[in-house]
Image: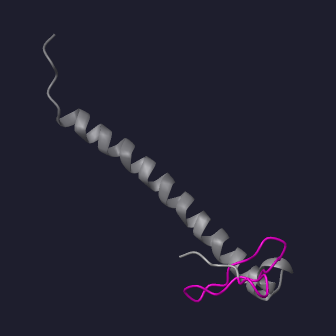
């Protein structure tokens, strides 16, 4: 949904419960601007998710190698 600027105030209306910013206005939650406790928790959670994703990728790569070996062992040689 888009916001429609008000002709009277120059500010945007809230559409769908989300405030829309207007050119020239900087509206950011405090957690995004000042490094408060919420932003620190969010950063730590994101770092943990990234670390877990890297571990999953490494595991899947290792698994792919092992599956490749099994497939190669079960595939009969091609007559050439």
Could you say which quadrant of the image residue 25 lies in?
Answer: bottom right
Marks counted in the figure total: 0
Could you say which quadrant of the image residue 51 lies in?
Answer: bottom right
Residue 78: x percent and y percent? 15, 19
**24 left or right of 79 in image:** right
**As rendered, which of 21 and 54 lies closer to the eye?**
21
Residue 65: x percent and y percent? 38, 42
Residue at position x 71%, y 74% from top? Answer: 43
**63 left or right of 73 in image:** right
Q: Is residue 74 above or below residue 10?
A: above
Q: Is residue 73 above or below residue 8?
A: above
Residue 73: x percent and y percent? 22, 34
Residue at position x 14%, y 27% from top? Answer: 76
The chief SS type of the magenta part is: loop
Residue 47: x percent and y percent? 67, 69
Could you say which quadrant of the image residue 12 lies in?
Answer: bottom right
**57 left or right of 76 in image:** right
In the rendered image, the quadrant that contains the C terminus is top left
Residue at position x 34%, y 44% from top? Answer: 66
Q: Residue furthest top?
A: 80
- Is residue 60 a member of the stretch shown in magenta? no
**23 left or right of 50 in image:** right
Magenta-drawn segment: 6-28
**As rendered, which of 46 and 65 lies closer to the eye?**
46
């Amino acid at each position: 949904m888009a916001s429609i600027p008000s002709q009277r105030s120059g500010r945007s209306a809230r559409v769908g419960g989300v405030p829309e910013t207007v050119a020239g206005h900087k509206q950011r939650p405090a957690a995004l601007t000042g490094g408060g406790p919420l932003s620190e928790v969010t950063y730590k959670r994101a770092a943990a998710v990234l670390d877990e994703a890297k571990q999953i990728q490494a595991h899947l790569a290792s698994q792919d190698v092992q599956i490749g070996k099994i497939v190669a062992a079960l595939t009969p040689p091609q007559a050439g």
